[in-house]
Amino acid sequence: MNKYADIIVDISHSKLDKVFQYHVPDNLTQKIVIGTVVNIPFGKGNKNLKGYVIGFTDKPNFDVDKIKDITGVASMNMSIEAHLIKLAVWMKERYACTIISALRTLVPINKKVNEKTQKEIIRIIDTDELKSYIKMWDSKNYKALSRASNHLLTCERCKQSAIIKKADVSPTVLLNLEKKGIIKINSERIYREPYNVNNIRRSKNKLPNMEQQIVINKVLSNLNKESQVHLIHGITGSGKTEVYMQIIDKVLEKGQQAIVLIPEIALTPQTVRNFISRFGNQVGVMHSKLSAGEKYDGWRRARDGDISIMIGPRSAVFTPFKNLGMIIIDEEHEMSYKSEVSPKYHAREVAIKRGEMTGAHVVLGSATPSLESYYLAKDGKYTLLELKEKAASTNKLDVRVIDMREELINGNKSIFSDTLRNEIQSKLFNKEQIILFLNRRGYSRFISCRQCGYVIKCDSCDIPYTYHAFGDKLICHYCGKTISMVSKCPSCNSKYIKQFGIGTEKVESYVKKEFPTARVLRMDLDTTTRKKSYDTILGKFRNGEADILIGTQMVAKGHDFPDVTLVGVIAADLSLYMSDFRASERTFQLLTQVTGRAGRSNLQGTAIIQSYTPEHYSIAKSKEQDYIGFYEAEIQYRQVMKYPPFSNLLVLLIQSTNEKELIRRSYELKNDILLVAPRLGLEVIGPSPANVSKIKNNYRRVILLRSIGYKELMQFINRYMERLSIKYKDISIQMDINPLISY
């Protein structure tokens, strides 16, 4: 009986976002299953493309004579679990993307990767016979064969690489010895290991405190029930990681696997170290800084059952475990869990859906949960669990807010308040460590002419360049364009060019000038471009090779440095007045998270928050580490303004290289939307300029649609957006549902 495969072709085009059928040749029937990536001829020219098998049938939907044969299995040697195919179909509907973009997201690499092997040389003749060969090699002046054979006298089994190096011979020489029956070459596949498991000391389960045990027991009591979502609201330092590991321990005992999601690559080394010390080589890692080979090996080990725990940022949620029991999302409030490229999925939503499909449970953890998650927990949709006590420290964190307006009145124009400066000096004297936080990289925020007021902007993006002292250059943080620092004003030719604002690079300069004996490290996007730069910087700080760590939000999340007793927030207001309804929430989260890096051991922790608006509730509540107080204030604002979680948003980002045409067409698009929006209960806001109105020579405007229900937005997308995209094909329209970034 003929067998036909339903295939999604690997082309990103909405018109091809459908199922194609291909015949499965007899010689491939045993090799192809649901999820296999195959080679297929496509189109009139039979162009060789990849395709994803999503199903089979023996009854074709098309004329049999027109159905082509699959030509082979793709050399990637990767296939997708059947339940993940269903998850991709759900993502297509949930995030209004093409099925192929969802399927591509499930596979960590899109190119062929060679398997890594290790070859072992085994001598299969005795010593006397080998010596006779050596005598013959010497008489014929076969020096390479003689060197290799002499090495084999003292090594009956050894790695091929060792012989090649020590005997100074090529692999061809060894192949020659194998042909002569002197040795046997065994080839064994080995996995690329981004973290050296053997160098990490193993540890045992710690004895949980009473609060931790209550949370552990509650989650474990639900493991045999239907999939549930648990939200662990635990203050910084309450020992959430230990809770995660003890829960996972029981999941593994049941023969199941677990996924642990973390928000930042910067957290990967610390988290991996913690989990490997507990679970050894059962732990795998997946993130964007790994090589293609490391990603491939991690994916294969998970699929083949060689590991039971996968750790990584949001894409690790697609790990191909066959018996998944638990997905843990640490720092669940973080923006990085939402993809900014299609499919614009949220890892939390995907994890919950995957849990529903497989029976796996989901644990969300944070000291500052997202308002949406906490609202759902209060509403009974999630199981709310609390950790209110610190696990290691008995000292209460001393948080002080400094009004920088008063500092200025008192004649202090420095970036350091007198209080912060004195605390830094005290901690340096006591040989304790310090973190200084500023969520803006670079040396100065912009360059301006003091004579005419001209601000030097990127001509492709229409935003100010940021000055970077290293290299004396101006960099656009949106398109990456770099130019040399100017010495004259491009507008009036004045020499009075001055740097305004402050970034982490400038803070580093101030610190080195103010505290010349201090050992300083800086951690931001500029210092973490290399593969292992995160691990290197954090490792040095953890090992006591630096006194002060200066950084952006990379230093704010999840790190555990026992010797850090002071955290200084240079400018708490930077995130507060962004054009974003989540600005207060993000400010509170950042301040609470970063101040929580201090006092995580028995040493007293101090945090200094410098602000020009200390009376704002997000800053006042972060001083008290009062999440509940902040939540109650913020949720009232959200309800009055009809923002999430009381509504759902659809952002239409409209772009064109012609500004006048973009403005005209954006109003026409709004009018067309208004013809259908009222009957779906949609509120239409805009069009208005985007926060950054021009990027890479593209002008940008935004239309916002707001709805109480999610399905109304999806009805609008499914019924009307394809027609609108065709009508407005002269401009680019991108959609984002419930975005976490501000457009």
Image: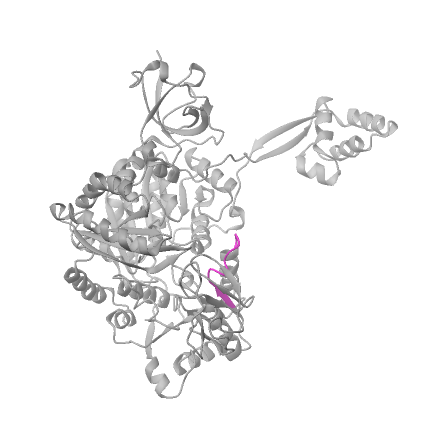
Q: Is residue 207 visible?
A: no
Question: Which portion, as a residue range, is magenta?
Answer: 521-532
Q: Residue furthest top?
A: 1
Query: Residue 66, relative to residue 640: is it above or below?
Result: above
Q: Give the number of callouts.
A: 0
Q: Residue furthest right?
A: 139
Query: Residue 386, relative to residue 404: is it above or below?
Result: above
Quick check: is 531 in the magenta stretch? yes
Query: Residue 190, relative to residue 547: is it above or below?
Result: above
Point out residue 683 in the picture as x, y percentages from the top left corner.
16, 53
Quarter-wise, where is residue 42 in the image?
top left
Quick check: is 686 in the magenta stretch? no
Quarter-wise, where is residue 450 in the image?
bottom left
Q: What secondary structure prevails in the magenta region? A: loop
Quadrant location, the N terminus: top left
Q: Residue furthest left?
A: 679
Which residue is painted at 36% across and 68% down in the image?
595
Q: Nearer the viewer, residue 23 or 281?
A: 23
Query: Residue 370, relative to residue 732: is it above or below?
Result: below
Q: Nearer the viewer, residue 24 or 522?
A: 24
Which residue is painted at 34% across and 58% down in the image?
239
Quadrant location, the C terminus: bottom left
Point out residue 287 in the picture as x, y percentages from the top left corner.
44, 47
Which residue is painted at 45% across and 65% down in the image?
465
Identify the coloring: one colour
Q: Nearer the viewer, residue 551 or 206?
A: 551
Point out residue 383 in the picture as x, y percentages from the top left corner.
21, 50
Q: Is residue 86 left or right of residue 532?
A: left
